[in-house]
Amino acid sequence: MFSKKTQDGALPPSKYRMGGKHFKNDAAFVKTAVRDVKRLERYCALGTDSRLLDWGCGAGRLAVGVREHFGRIADYHGVDVQPELVEWAEENLAGPGFRFTCVDVSNERYNPDGTPERTLSAEPGSVDVFYAYSVFSHMNDEDTPAYLQLIGEALAPEGRAFVTCFVEEDVPGWEENPEGYGPLEWKGRLHCTRFARWHFEDHVNAARLAVDRFEYGRETDGQSLYVLRKR
């Protein structure tokens, strides 16, 4: 069961909420979480029997949405590189059907001293639904194809991956913090990484994945949505 604090409606403090201004308000935090769980239900067949990997889980926003919409599922597994966020989630959200793992892998923005060895913390074929919101939007062009390959390996045969990233037509293959792009002034390593659509989809194809659904520019700060499946 959830801790009493969470049952009584406790949510992560604002300093632990990734996504800038978009998730600071409690109502918006819960609403967006439930919205994404419902989209995973529609686009990826998420249900109470599903095994869900929330990659880049932060302090567990999606776990809150799962709790609100389903109560629980077969396995929610939240993975992140930021120990303070995972610790909060583990203390407040872990319980039957909900678990969290901190992985010490390298990312120039969020964990620059981490190990270069890449992992999703998932066994091959063990994931029915993979969720990575605003993760590839902060990833370099070497890690991106490698992690897409790992996603393909982790997905069950009928599994689906729900990921967001910045993609555009008629731009260089990959750029870091493109000037004058989007609603923010990008600062620091990998604040915004943008792909040419063809380039990102080349990475998808090389990982033996296929695009099931594409929605351009509707996500946070203008990111696009991909739903991917195994080929």
Image (cartoon, helix red, strand yellow):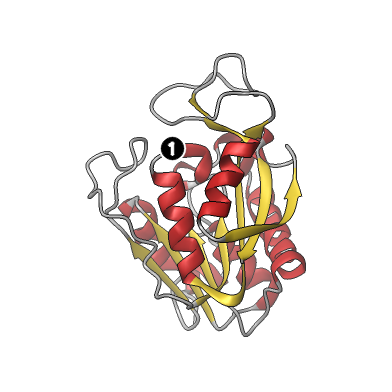
Q: Position of residue 88 (x, y in %)?
A: 39, 59
When asked about the image quadrant of residue 181, the answer is top right
Amino acid residing under circle 1? Asp
Query: Which is more toward the observer, 214 or 230?
Result: 230
Q: Which residue is situated farthest in the top direction here?
A: 180
Q: Residue at x 54, y 20 (%)?
A: 178
- Which quadrant does the C terminus fall into? bottom right
Q: Quadrant of residue 159?
A: bottom right
Give the crowd class for mark 1: few <14, some 14-19, many >=20 residues within 10 Å. some
Q: Nearer the viewer, residue 63 or 220?
A: 220
Relative vertical location of residue 29 with respect to residue 176 in this rendering, above or below:
below
Q: Residue at x 64, y 78 (%)?
A: 71
Q: Is residue 120 left or right of residue 8?
A: left
> In this orientation, does residue 57 appear?
no
Q: Name the residue tied to disc 1.
A: 141
Task: Check the image and report above or below for 229 versus 185.
Answer: below
